[in-house]
Amino acid sequence: MNSQRFGVVVAILVGVSIAGQSRLNGALGARLDDGVAAAVISFGSGFVLLCIGLAFSKRMQNRLAEVRTAVRTKTLAPWQCIGGVCGAFYVACQGITISTIGVAVFTVAVVGGQLLSSLLVDRAGLGPAESSPLTGNRVLGAALALIAVAVASSGRIDADASALLFAVLPAIAGIGLAWQQAVNGRVAAVGGPMVATWINFATGTTALVIVAAIGLTVRGWPSTPPTDWWLYVGGTLGIAHIAAAAVLVRTLGVLLLGLSVIAGQLLGALLLDAIVPASGATLTVTVVVGGVLTLVAVWIAAGRSKT
């Protein structure tokens, strides 16, 4: 198995794990009745763990110093170190829009923005990999993946036309996710994946705390936190996701990484709906077809284009 194929397999597994993380964070948000507060807990717990690791790891401290030097010498631009803000915006969009447009429309909007942005980010060479041309295979793979997500979500799209205007926000969030993967890869190339992950969590947690503080003035404090320990492991999973993506983007590029993770998310959702379905969730033929189509999209995008 060559390095690209191995990277695709790992990225798909990352997507499966993200599906599990989303389920955990969603359950925590429902128990707190505050999605932003749940995101602060998820990001914040991951950031605390990373800070403990930083405090006891001389290697991480040295690599973080290398990132500071790279920023000071302009090898890295300061804006390349704030990728975590995009993750925070994505989570905030969940709380702002899903109640209006539903999960299905939200997912299609995010994937659409992410795939378009991935093509452009790869073309511009913003990530650590070399610039990738807009080949027929890559464009076809991105288009098929968007169709796959739309098919998987078709049975659950029930928002009216006016509510669909809210889909602009998750589309922008999707654009930001592709950019986040690219710049985190740049930081990882200098400081390593764990330092890139620490910086991502630091900026994302800061942004979410600000949003949560604003929310407190409007909604007040969330409900009493639940005592189920497993609801709080989302941040730990997030550390693995961000670190893995920061490494994989060098080999796969932003588009193929995004496609592989999306495929894994759909497959993970299939497994969760089949084994431990959430309230109101059902495993449908359209979801299964969407998952298969996404895997085909990854295979097409990873192939050699003749155009």
Image: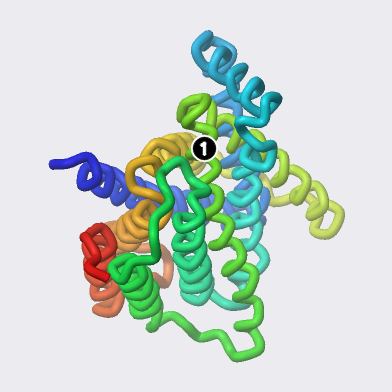
Q: Position of residue 33 (x, y in %)?
A: 64, 57
Q: How many marks?
A: 1
**Which is nearer the eye, 292 or 68?**
68
Q: Residues within 10 Å of mark 1 (few under 14, many from 20)?
A: many
Q: Quadrant of residue 240?
A: top left
Q: Residue furthest front?
A: 307
Q: Position of residue 223 (x, y in %)?
A: 68, 51
Q: Position of residue 139 (x, y in %)?
A: 36, 70
Q: Is residue 26 placed above or below 283 in the rendered structure?
A: above
Q: Quadrant of residue 205?
A: top right
Q: Position of residue 196 (x, y in %)?
A: 53, 32
**Which is nearer the eye, 260 or 272?**
260
Q: Residue at x 56, y 17 (%)?
A: 54
Q: Residue at x 48, y 27 (%)?
A: 194
Let me know if residue 211 appears in the view.
Answer: yes
Query: Which residue is disc 1 drawn over?
Result: 186
Q: Residue at x 28, y 68 (%)?
A: 137
**Which is nearer the eye, 264 or 75?**
75
| Left or right: 113, with 16 as reference point | right
| Left or right: 158, with 279 as reference point | right
